[in-house]
Image: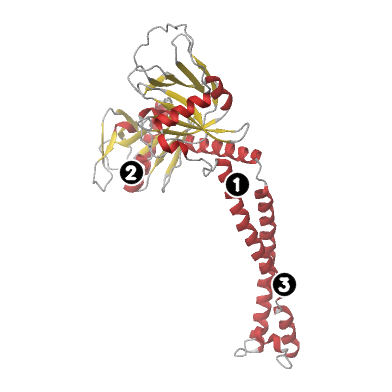
Amino acid sequence: MVEYVSEELEKAQLQEVLSTEKGLVLGFYRFTKQPRMMYLVFDLDPVFPFFTLLEENPWVKYKKTKPTALFLTSHAKNQLFRDGALNEALGRVVIFRLGADGDVTTIEFRSVPKQVNLIVEHLKKSISWFPVKELPPHQPVEQEEEVRSLAFLTAQWKRLRLGDRSAKSSAGTATPYEKWVKSRERDLDKKTKALQAVQTQIEQFETEEWAEVGEYLKSYGIKNLKPEWSVYVNFEKSISENIQLCFDKAKAAKNKAVGARERLQSLKREIEAIKDMSVQRFESQLLQKQKDDGQKKNSRKVEGRLRKLPLGKDAVAYMGKSAADNMNLLRSSKPHDLWVHLKDYPSAHAIIHRQKTQNLADSELISVGKWLVEEGLSKSQTAMGGKYAVVAVECRHVKPIKGDKMGRVTYHNAREFLIAL
């Protein structure tokens, strides 16, 4: 079973982590062979533990959040399947590894009756389904056993654990690739209709005779005007007003035709791109999305009318212009960011965004303190000079006062320093 799973999930990507009272399901998208989702199922029944690889999720209706699933989602999602092995020294203990060197997640499944467990480890952090107990040394017993195929074992487990539901077909379950193709087909249909609409607009702009009517009115007035041109003339206005109107309309139609042709070319390029529904295109888009999601995860977007003070080494100080700005800034900060405020003076506060292990020099904190004084106090106050006390606290130790509309907070573990103007 270990060899079969390792071969089928080679370089597959973990995309779903689902937990139930019965066990854990890991949804992998397989890029090689037939691209599709595959589900690695761990049944943690204390008496009849089992794991298998299926083409559908057998427990989709029995979701329940488990700490092990949350840990895997946080540390292993989007990682690639690396390998699997049997720990022969402990007996029926299987170890699967995900991720690249330096960022490996290990899943240990103990398929030993009455000693069942699933232990996940990532960078010296670990979590287990049940409390971890030490396994005794494995003592293999030499005896003839009935040889059963993997298909037979899986079918037997389905009958035991799933009952009649195992007979249901998974034919109606679309793979991510199939869903992507259907989405592309819908987009292609919309773009094609839009293309036809733009072509109709261009034909309409080109067939309008505003310029010809304007030239005729300019030379002959409304005398002997063609009947079909009467729709272009407002008979309640003077000839000069109609001439101006016709030339304005002709100019607008020409500009609209130019814009419509640009839109037409853009739609043609989009349609050509959408027509590519190959597996290679799907995989490249999936990898690009993961890259973009990773960049979004590592970046922080600061909203509001904020003032900004760069400090170097990726550290930046932000300051709001109102109590609401200050609260939004505080709530969007990370626990290791620094909250800086003038002591005993009502003013805005500054939040220093920094890396988790980044230490700021005293000169940088002093520059933020001076910035607070210059921005928070009046010119007459700062012109008088003097010394001001400033406090700096990690945001984890700052708590807004509930219901306070002035943006006041409580804090502890503060670091205090003086600045002189």
Q: Which residue is mark 3?
A: 206
Look at 42% across and 6% down and name the residue there: 139
Look at 65% across and 72% down and name the residue there: 252
Q: How is the image coloured?
A: secondary structure
Label 2 to label 3, Cα distance in Å?
57 Å
User: Image quarter for residue 398?
Assistant: top left
Of 174 and 13, the residue lying toward us: 174
Q: Which residue is mark 2?
A: 327
Amino acid type, residue under disc 3 in the picture: Glu
Q: Is residue 365 left or right of residue 269?
A: left
Residue 204 spot, x, y in % from top left: 68, 72
Residue 219 spot, x, y in % from top left: 76, 87
Whichever of callouts 1 and 3 sits on the residue coming sooner in the sequence is: 1
User: Image quarter for residue 177?
Assistant: top right
Amino acid type, residue under disc 2 in the picture: Met
- Up/down of 387 relative to 200, above or below: above
